[in-house]
Image (cartoon, rainbow, N blue to C red):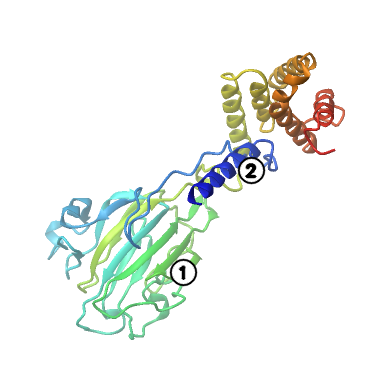
Amino acid sequence: MKKILILLTLLAGFSALDAARFYGEPPDEHHPWAVHDMNRPQPPLVVPGDEYGDPPSDAIVLFEGKQSQENWKHLRPDDKRKNDWIFTDDYMQAVRGSGYIATKEEFGDCQLHVEWAAPEEVQGSGQGRGNSGVFLLNGMVEVQVLDNYRNPTYPDGSAGSVYGVMPPAANALRAPGEWQSYDIIFRRPIVRDGEVLDSGRLTVLVNGVVVQDSTPLEGGGGHKTRQDLDRVFPEKGSLRLQDHGNPVRFRNIWYRPLRPRPLDGGTDGRLSVEATMNKRTEIAASIRKDAQSMEGVDKALRLLESIVYLENKEARADANQLIQAYLEEFAVASADDAESYRGKMLELDRAFHYLKKYQFIDGDNKLLKKVDKICKEQGWKKR
């Protein structure tokens, strides 16, 4: 039974590959790819961690033990720093007077995982208990770290808040001394020439519970003040952890870069007209280049596929010539040999009807009519 299921899965995969050409809606002025486009790059393979919170195969690990100390630097000068952060095989810990610590690595839009723990022995209250912060992009955006387990404080300064901007949707903390996990999806604000093109967004899960859901950043927030989106945010910056006078511990820190948005040159999603046309031109050229390694109908189909992205008279003429030669070959084939033409002829039929449907050719196209007639006369498709 298992072998049968595997075979059916493989056959379904082949069907999907066959159907992807001349299948979904073609590119338009804002989308360079067709719907269900097999010319689109396949997603990269990422092997997930063995357990929740473990770094996947493409993660950049920032802390996994004492040896990770080389990934970090103190921001407070040596002559003004009273203490250093503690690094052990199990955690790194803030020490009063040590100041902020930052990664040497700089990154921008990311998936970030951080685990932290406030002291088991409860001292202080409100903002004075287990206080620290996860600061992105050189400190411009803060996700608050605070032991507010049964410890009320101002909501936009609670654990999991975008500090000074948005309270968490829930208090999902475990008890003091237990390890807490933050999973953060960060998209930086994009401001160019004083115009806000994207306000940026932050999604945060605390211990697996969504507490920020694509929260607009509104400038990043701050202590007792708001910040407008009138600053230029860098494309990349360091991750910073805060010494707020409390011995908060951190472990298992890693990130994954996110794929670029269209504003950053990405080609997935809704693009500008100019970016779409540039990408369609690139795709069409790549398909035509690929066609040069083919012969006969396969080459013709690939050339016809290229004009879906960008019209090219030479590619169209070459395809028509190859198809005409194929039809002439079929015309003199014996009845016994006719069946061997079935697969390619049906591919041509589907291609021509697709091109007709989306107005790349008109309904009076001679090759379309010839192929359609052959397929019907041979009983290869339903009338």
Residue sitting nearer the eye, 128 or 67: 67
Q: Position of residue 174 (x, y in %)?
A: 32, 78
Quadrant for residue 153, please give it.
bottom left
**Residue plotted at (24% across, 65% down):** 250
Query: Callout 2: helix, strand or loop?
Result: loop
Report the side of 83 relative to 380 (left or right): left
Looking at the picture, tell me which residue is in the foreground, 160 or 10: 10
Could you tell which of marks 2 and 1 lies nearer the N-terminus?
Answer: 2
Q: Amino acid at mark 1?
A: Gln
Q: Is residue 111 above or below residue 35?
A: below
The CA span between labels 2 and 1 is: 30 Å
Q: Image quarter for residue 306?
A: top right
Q: Residue at x 13, y 57 (%)?
A: 78
User: What amino acid type should be assigned to the residue bearing mark 2?
Assistant: His
Q: Residue at x 69, y 33 (%)?
A: 308
Label 1 residue SS: strand
Residue neighbourhood size for the residue with mark 2, other residues' Cα within 10 Å, grouped as few (<14), some (14–19), many (≥20): many
- The foreground one among 209 and 323 is 323
Residue 319 visible to the viewer: yes
What residue did someone put label 2 on?
31
Residue 193: tell me if it is visible: no
Find residue 30 and report its horizontal and vertical position in percent: 65, 44
Residues packed near mark 1 inside 10 Å, few (<14), some (14 to 19) or many (20 plus) = many
Residue 90 numbered tag? none
Q: How many numbered badges does the structure rendering display?
A: 2
Q: Residue furthest right?
A: 364
Residue under label 1, please give it.
212
